Image: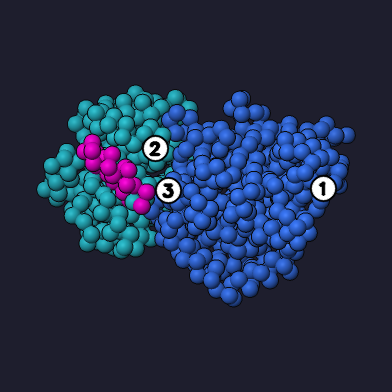
Chain colours: A blue, B cyan
Amino acid sequence: MSVDEVLVMPDLRGHFGKFGGRFVPEALMAALDELDDAFRKAMVDPSFLAQLHDLQVNYTGRPSPITHAKRFSEHAGGATVLLKREDLNHTGSHKINNVLGQGLLTQRMGKTRVIAETGAGQHGVATATVAALLGLECVVYMGEEDTKRQALNVARMKLLGATVIPVTSGSKTLKDAINEAMRDWVANVQDTHYMLGTVAGPAPFPEMVRDFHRIIGDESREQMLERFGRLPDVVAACVGGGSNAIGIFTAFIPDSDVRLLGLEAGGDGIETGRHASTIVGGAVGVLHGARSYIMQDDDGQTIESHSISAGLDYPSVGPEHAYLADIGRAEYRSITDVQAMNAFKLLCETEGIIPAIETAHALAGALEIGKELGKDAIILVNCSGRGDKDVETAAKWFDMNP
Amino acid sequence: MSLLHEVFARAKSENRAALIAYLPAGYPTADGAVECIAAMVAGGVDIVEIGFPYSDPVMDGPTIQEAVNISLVGGTKSATVIETVKRVSELGVPTLVMSYWNPIERYGLESFATDFHAAGGAGVITPDLTPEEADDWIAATDEQDVERVFLVALSSSDERISKVASVTTGFVYAGAVMGVTGARASLSDAIEGLVTKVRRHTELPVAVGLGVSTPEQAHEIAQYADGVIVGSAFVTAIANGGPQAAKALAQALSQGLSR
Ligand SMILES: Cc1ncc(COP(=O)(O)O)c(C=O)c1O
């Protein structure tokens, strides 16, 4: 597989090699075709691109800076750890990049209502934010379990005028929130756009969400050359559905010397079965409209995932990651809850930055690979979000409550 | 002619629509499902759809979600589904499986088609398999003489209806509502138009399902469709009154099917 072929992925039917595609009820096909059409037209329409760019700069605050994490680097075998600061975006994570794009598309399609699923609540907050900005009605589905561990974000969404619906079916987490959002979408597709929050789901979502996030990598690549005069040796990011990772990877895919490292949530450890590492510990299957690596039993029933991080607690992964793993262009590893929480605390104490627990998985990966590569290596980590929402979880974990 | 098509032809000659009933395998138990289906067949059900219980039923409303959950918690496996197909086809009714795609893909397409055929199954309904992704499934089902049923929706364009019809062999399943399964008080007037559009693309029977629950609705649909599909209403009947209630519902529905 040449790099050029990787670049033209997906094919016209949304396949990344054998992954991706569309496995959805016929009732959704018209809406997906409509979305596909609106997306393709928008991406070559100078007025859409100008509108999006204006919001990225003047609303989100892009470009996000790269911070040299000097003291943190000392714990990474002396390698240089750089942070792409998506946590500094308005709303506190990378998720805003995608929803600005999809929000503008919603308006172009003449739809007045948006729905979203959310795990950590960051995508829900971003969606509620953009809905407020653009005057759209907003309903967010969130697993009941997640509404508890991310209570701050539930309050934020409500303040922004969104309706938050706790989902009580199945594992009461992100996967079930997606099920419920899809049920809503089928019933209300005429006036409703489903703002899927990651690079999963049926085509065109994986491609579209990637293209709205690729600005992370595009900026990073330029910033690296400008400030450091070279590309990083490794680009590392956490992988739930995979949007922040694909966002920072995409610009570097043609740079075959740059290692792309995705960090999946290892929960209690792969060997315990209580994890959310779909590429490292799953098998090929179909979930939520696409073929990818998923966590399933012998009968094809989805196995519930486990992670301390609500945003990574998902038993599938975007199909492009499955593909990049298969062709060996990107490498995926698993980070346990313990590793992630140690890295979380380390970043707090060495850099004065409280990261999201999702992001802490990428930081733990950077510590690990830094020790492997030594002090000449430059590791660029996607600092996908800030950790305000996780303060409660962390205080409990570290026994800090009075 | 396949047994499935014979049953549609017989209903047509009797100037009525065929009654198609859905029940998940393993609901309320593995044996209980077969017992209920036997009662439903005695009550007038012509064709049976056995649901393959799945952990993430995105196209189902609360009634079937709950039934599927009971089935899975009760230990239903893919082998249970095949065994249920075997026992139901022995009743002499055309028996189909309705399954989300992943359980079939996990089982293996060829193995599933082979085992399903060996169990006496007539056809498989795959509501989240789009024709675009179905090449391997078409090959596997052709090989084993298993009928394929795909769905059309109220939102389907002519172009899509034509595509769906071209890969379907059993009957075309016309979704009566834009939404998940579950009883609806009223159904859209647009269904008849959808059925008419489908007929322009195929000679195959067209059956209408999703949301249909009452004899009145069945009667209305029977005027223009070849089959009426009822699912959630049977699940609810069984939850409230077991096999007797399921039989009574089948009788009431089948009385509404004449033209
Ligand atoms: C800060 C942050 N990072 C990462 C993720 C994981 O999502 P993805 O893998 O799509 O980037 C989330 C999801 O909620 C998040 O909030």
Q: Kindly indicate the quadrant of the structure image that contains residue A34.
A: bottom left
Query: Any mark on residue A23, and which?
Result: 3
Instruction: Confirm whether circles 2 and 1 share one chain.
Output: no
> Over which residues does the magenta segment extend?
B132-151
On the image, the x and y values in percent for residue B246 come to 32, 34
Q: Earlier in the sequence, mark 1 or mark 3?
A: 3
Q: What's the chain of the residue with tag 1? A: A
Q: Is residue A30 left or right of residue A172?
A: left
**Pointer 2 with pointer 1, Cβ within 8 A:** no
Q: Residues within 10 Å of mark 1 (few under 14, many from 20)?
A: some
- Image position of A63 (left or right of A258): right
Q: Residues within 10 Å of mark 2 (few under 14, many from 20)?
A: some
In the image, is residue A375 above or below residue A26?
above
Mark 2–mark 3 distance (CA, rounded to whole Å): 12 Å
**Callout 1 secondary element:** loop
Assess whether residue A163 is covered by the magenta stretch. no
Name the residue beneath numbered marker 1: A69
What chain does badge 3 belong to? Answer: A
Please identify the quadrant where the N terminus of chain B is shown.
top left
Place of residue A295 in the rendered image (x, y in percent of width and height, measured from the top left) = 53, 35
Do dots 2 and 3 share one subunit? no
Residue at x 43% of width, y 61% of height: A33
Numbered circle sitting on residue B105: 2
> Under tag 2, what secondary structure?
helix
Disc 2 to disc 3: CB gap under 8 Å: no
Left or right, B138 with reference to A3: left
